[in-house]
Image: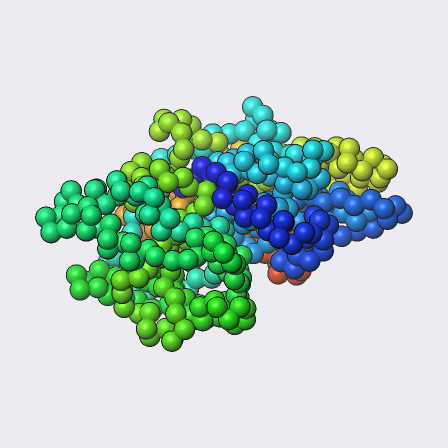
Amino acid sequence: MFKKRTITAILSIAVAAASFTGCSSDNNRSSDSTAVKATVSSPDASKSYNVVCTIFPEYDWVKEIIGDNADNVDITYLLDSGIDLHNYQPTADDIMKITSCDLFVYVGGESDEWVEDALANATNPDMKVINLMVVLGDSAKLEELKEGMQENEHEHKTDFDDSEVKDRTLAEWNGSWQSTYPLLLDGSLDEVWEHKAEDDDTMTAEDYKNKYTTAYETDAVTINIKAPEIEYVAADKTIKADYEYSGFYIRTKDDGSKQARYKFEKKSGDDEAAKYIVFSDHNIEPSEPEHFHLYSGNDGFDTLVEEGTHFPTYYPTSLSAEDIVEEMTGGHDHSHDHEEDEEEYDEHVWLSLKYAKVFCAEIERKVSEIDPANADTYKSNYDKYIMQLNYLDSDFETLFAAAKEKTLVFGDRFPFRYFVDDYGLDYFAAFIGCSAESEASFETIKFLSDKVKELNCNTVFTLENSNKDIANAIISSSGNKNVKIAELNSLQSVSKSDINSGASYISLMQKNYDVLAGVMK
């Protein structure tokens, strides 16, 4: 599911926005109402620093090390909407924050390949950067496709039961998206029409091009989404509006196939922005969109229900024209932008308490380089925080050392590779940690249910926000109704609301300890 992200288009928008507003980076930070920030003070009010983090653990580690004694340190958490790292696509506003910050902290795995272009356009020559995967070096682990796991086989599901369709949030479409219309006009998509005509005796490539010229036509060449706001960028203007989810409807086509479409209604914003919009991305539950068709109008949702002939289509701005052609013609899997046999590294490094201590040491070092006047304070905060990490790490070691059964069965993705290796555990799971799949095959369900019986497991684990369908299927197939479902938090979808409610790296890992202690003692 990984995509190689080139962000030239986003950078152009970011530069244009900066020129239009005429604002400094400090002004942009002070007006930002969406990113999570922690601002603290120190004796020297003349200094100002900005730290940008991609994921929640980084944000919380930096916050703990900064403490209460730094001067005007803004800590920005980019994924504060709760979208996870694998689904995240940076907006122009996100890129502006990154290119001008003093310290940028990111994971550095396949999902972060877009960062290379962002850093190449940095406007702060003194910027410090922490890449967690680089910090790990040779300790980084390859992704592991274990026995029984289902490989990614994403395809559009059109024969679902209505009960399978789940509500979704606008945040799932967060990111920057490019219209296919300009690519159609400049001939970049001609290969697509030729491909469609190959198996069609009734329409030529030119017929298809004419059809999609009508379908794709739009002035909004770029759409930037950061829920609840949608920004429509045309050649001569930009309009914005906030939208609220209004449910879904299921459309059954003449051939019996189905589509789920998701409705959003404008609550505020520019008058020119459509009042009603509908997303169709071929998914039927919370999941990563690869592209989407957008239906819009001002006369109510009923007018948007039927297919119609006008459905502007959008792909991530990170994809090149060649990438989009291959997506549209069923070419190679764009979850990989490298040779098919190249191995990928597991990027869920933050779930290792042992490596968390390594990352915190690097953060303390970089922050002290930026603000040497408060280096002693940062070192003191770091020492205190490391003690907390040590205590929790020791608790996990004690727990697993005494556990009779040291194998976890996951009816879900498995991002805990680093965690289980830390404590000598084994596992079986439905998917690798970065899988885009949400439905397991009969073979995978049977394999895991057999493991439950073989190991005499009393628990099947899932991740936060799981619908638990796979776990329930495993339990049902095992024939043991006494098997329970337990949830572990991967810290991949921590939102601003969670933080405001007191969530921290320590508290969430402690909850994981409590869950495991209740199962394994």
Is 297 drawn above or below residue 63 in the view shown? below
Is 497 drawn above or below residue 66 in the view shown? below
- Residue 285 falls in which quadrant of the image? bottom left
Q: How is the image coloured?
A: rainbow
Q: Nearer the viewer, residue 103 or 355?
A: 103
Quarter placement of the N terminus: top left
Q: Position of residue 49 (x, y in %)?
A: 76, 44
Furthest-right residue in this view: 43
Q: Position of residue 70 (x, y in %)?
A: 81, 45
Q: Nearer the viewer, residue 312 or 504?
A: 312
- Answer with left or right where residue 107 lies relative to residue 501: left
- Answer with left or right where residue 277 lies relative to residue 58: left
Q: Position of residue 157 (x, y in %)?
A: 28, 54
- The reply to whether residue 361 is in sight is no
Q: Nearer the viewer, residue 274 or 51?
A: 274
- The reply to whether residue 220 is in sight is yes
Identify the residue at image location x=62%, y=46%: 96
Identify the residue at image location x=53%, y=68%: 270
Identify the residue at image location x=57%, y=41%: 351
Q: Nearer the viewer, residue 191 or 324?
A: 191
Furthest-top residue in this view: 138
- Answer with left or right where residue 85 lies relative to residue 452: right
Q: Position of residue 325 (x, y in %)?
A: 32, 41
